[in-house]
Amino acid sequence: MTAHLAKIALTEMQAELRDQAMKFCGEKSPVSKVRALLEDERGYDEAVWAEMAELGWLGIAIPEDQGGLGLELADVVPIAEAMGKHLMNSPYASTTLAAQAILHGGSDAQKAEWLPKLSSGTVATVALFEPSGAWELDAVTGETKTFVLNLNAAEIVVTTVKHDGQTRLALIPRDTIEARRETIIDETKRSYRFDVPEIDAIWLMPAELTSAALDRIELVANLLQAAELSGAAMACVDYTVDYLKTRKQFGKVIGAFQALKHPTVDAFMGAEGARSLLYAAATHVERQGEGEIAVRMANAKAGGALSYAADRSIQFHGGFGFTYDCDAQLYRRVAMFAASQFGDAAFHRARLAELLL
Amino acid sequence: MISVEDFAAQADAWFAEHTPRGVPFMLPLTFMEVGTDEQFDFLRDWQNQVYRAGYLGAHWPTDYGGGGLTQKHQDAATRVMRKYNVPIMLNAIGIGWAGPLILDTGTEDEKRKYLPGILSADDIWCQGFSEPDNGSDLGNAQLKAVRDGDEYVLNGSKTWTTQGNYAKYMILLARTDFDAPNKYAGLSFFLAPMRIPGVETTKIRKLTGEYGFTQTFFTDARIPADTLMGQEGEGWKVAMRTLEYERGARGGQAGGYTISQTDPLEVVGLAKRATRNGQPALEDPVMRDRLMAQMIEGQAMMANRERAKIMPLVMERPFALPMLSKLQFTEYARETGELALELEGAQSGYYVGEAGSREDGYWQRSYLNAFSATIGGGTSQIQRNIVGEHVLGLPKTR
């Protein structure tokens, strides 16, 4: 069927980025920091964000003549994976999504104005979802936007709007928006809702590029999400295994009980499969049609892998697992929120069935 | 030396011409399902043809009957075999684990004596590890081997001996010391001849209704002492090494394949032909979802295999992917069979030989047979213990 889609290529650049990102996120995002930021209005550390910009991470998939590094989309994967592994919130995904939308759907003037800024650390986001709950990005009324991540920190918002009866993309300046923060399941993230203001015609992105830009947003969003979830799944397994190795009950370290050991191995197997599919997706993401297949497979697999690993982690931590203090809930919430964005696993499988069956 | 590309092209041409088609009886999907003499004779002849053409053991040394090429050459030939979906290689235990073991650790005499016959399928090998009372608890083997001059005298029984009724040799784990400090220290490993007085096999009828395994009884059977592999008392070490071949965690296999891989596309094909509620099963949304989930799993296994080759991407746990592979592939095959039966809807109730069945009960038989691999070679539950303990570092289950 799709045997060649299982092939994985790893460039030296990606291997270096992965080492760098894992180290960086590990240092900057210990779980104590993650928990401290849960209470923070902004939800991330601006100084750390500035460091990321300095490392060049924001310009990776932006062409050199637009102020970026001119690398590939595949090269953002190791970074998103590392962030997921360390539960590190930042506007990385939302800014990358906005940049890709502008790159593939913006006018020359919009590209020239925004891409260099986004490469160097200006925060942006995308506003795509409406209260109807539809995951189809072109199903918009253009009245109210929800699940807009990092809106408070963003200077610009790539928004789907209804213009002359058509779905269009627009770059809405943050200062024209009145928003309220939403309470969402993943407390590491910051989500907002706003009523779409009257659209100034100069904000609109070219109509003929709308469809391509929406496709690009969906592809990139699913790839970044697969990376985040895959990283988190492996971390969640590690976290669970550490506990199973130390906690004693009935005179035994509980990891010796098969009832706990076997599902943990299954969780590990899921996380390994998710990792492999993630790298396969990174390898194929830019290939027409095949990129979508590989990315949806990776996302569907990663969502399931993290959900299972985190669900079992809560259970295996017993009474402690039911407390807010146990990190297992942090992982579970990441997976729950991800499933609400850009389609859950069943949605991706339905799309895949259309593409493959 | 011929280039890998040229070798692959030659193999492609050869298999295109020589792959048997229209075989008038059902061929086994795995080496564990060889239940009739008709199947056995056919597959022995087929393996021999492939070997003589140079596509099995291509990378084994010429001194021992191999082709003297490289692993890459053999892998290329094996890929061609998959491409043409050729019949399986019969002598699985020989080419897959006894052979590599002898090649790696055997004496010069052992290599010359045993290896050529393994490749040609003249000498069929079987494995004497499991016992009637000790399936997955291999370390508890009780078959007794008592040294008597230049011979060992064997008494006891081994079971689930695949192709035991056809085998000339057995890799045998036996107890030479009942007073050893622990159960593992008393074990020894033999390359035991099978066609000698005191060795009898009885066929075991499987859940499918067919045959393929035997139970082997040893009653004062005398084997030469020099059939001991390694040192007396070190059998556990040798057996563990053998299991690494069996589980695919160590290379050196002669090549080819011994279990046909379940291709998810076959199930898609079935979904197109089968009907549920008067419609093609492929249009049933639940079935579509199940199919996609299964295809994603299949794709993940293939991607695992690719990632295993890329060191920076497996650094954290270098042996994890190979150690998971037996568990994954065997469970996947079983689940695929189960899904196929669901797709068949009302027709899933028929069995082999019934005119109303789909593909003559192929999936019914295939699903039931799939358990041989999730149980044999260490059950999936044992595999989870192994991965949990050796990869994740969880404490031992005792």
Image: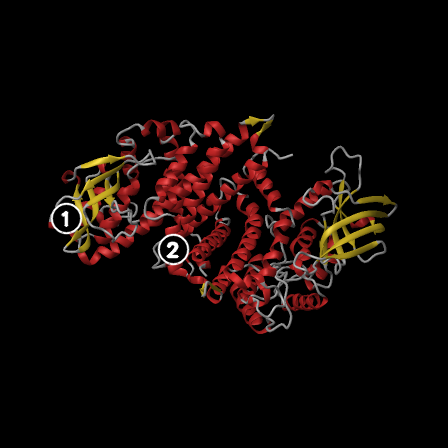
**Secondary element at tag 2:** helix
Left or right of B358 on screen, residue B50: right
Residue A97 horizontal/vertical position (percent): 27, 46
- In the image, is residue B264 above or below residue A258? below
Q: Residue at x 70, y 59 (%)?
A: B212
- Identify residue type, mark 1: Trp
- Identify residue type, mark 2: Ala
Q: Which residue is mark 2?
A: A350
Q: Are marks 2 and 1 on the same chain?
A: yes
Disc 2 chain ID: A
Q: Residue A313 versus residue B93: which sits nearer the camera?
A: A313
Q: Residue A49 versus residue B164: which sits nearer the camera?
A: B164
Q: Return the disc, 2 or 1, that comes first in the chain's sequence.
A: 1
Q: Which residue is mark 1?
A: A203
Residue A164 horizontal/vertical position (percent): 14, 55
Q: Quadrant of the C terminus of chain A?
A: bottom left
Considering every residue shown, the one lying at the far right of the view is B149
Mark 2, other Cα within 10 Å: few <14 / some 14–19 / many ≥20: some
